[in-house]
Image (cartoon, rainbow, N blue to C red):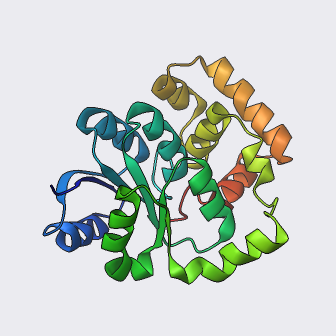
Amino acid sequence: MKPRVLLADDHTLVLAGFVKLLEDSCEVVGLVEDGRALLDAAQHLQPDIAIVDISMPLLNGIEACSRVRAASPQTKLIIVTMHAAMPYVQAAFKAGAAGYVLKRSATDELLQAIRTVRSGNYYVTPLMTKEVVNVLVKGPSDSNASLDDLSTRQREILQLVAEGYTVKEIAGQLGLSPRTVEFHKGRTMQQLQVRSTAELVKYAIAHALIVPT
């Protein structure tokens, strides 16, 4: 039986390319363009596989992965991204991903990654082999420690602030009071040692929570 696959990427052309690549071997059950839509679709469709980009609006792919694991535990998650750095790989697997593929090699690797994770194993693109071995030999980098120290709610609000939403708009989206949003924003700025919203935006871009336009 063909695996049922849900695709999540904020670029329509990328989604169309994945559909073309997978249509003979998989049943593509849904296409979404942001992290919140991914959560809704995963809960509703319960796919076998979700192909997820990291840099998506409203909720980035890594945060979304950890929530999809709760909403649809049987779904295997494969990150397909342009980010070729170990902190992203580590964060992805920590969030529950079973595969990590770079977009530049997805045409050659994605079907193999799907077969591998569907069989219960993990897949990491061979393009990252050197970096993975370095981490195993030298130990993990702590370069992402500050982001890891934030709560799920703080990371969620950080992304929305960086995307340009006002405190009132964030409060409405998340069902919180503006005062609560301000509290989380202030705590986040304190923990990250930044002094302005502009610096929060720079931090979010540096950690792939948003993509600069």
In this rendering, is residue 64 above or below 172?
Answer: below
Residue drawn at (59%, 78%) of the image: 128
Q: Can residue 140 be seen by looking at this rendering?
A: yes
Query: x and y percent of residue 161 in the render?
Result: 60, 42
Q: How many marks?
A: 0
**Relative to the observer, which residue lies in front, 95 or 133?**
133
**Relative to the observer, which residue lies in front, 95 or 171?**
95
In this rendering, is residue 111 above or below 185?
Answer: below
Side (left or right) of 24 relative to 120 = left
Residue drawn at (49%, 62%) of the image: 122
In this rendering, is residue 154 above or below 122?
Answer: above
Residue drawn at (42%, 45%) of the image: 35
Using the rendered view, name the quadrant where residue 109 is placed: bottom left
Side (left or right) of 198 relative to 69 = right
- Quadrant where the image shows the N terminus: bottom left
**Relative to the observer, which residue lies in front, 120 or 184?**
120
Query: x and y percent of residue 126 in the render?
Result: 52, 81
Q: Can residue 9 be seen by looking at this rendering?
A: no
Side (left or right) of 2 relative to 182 = left
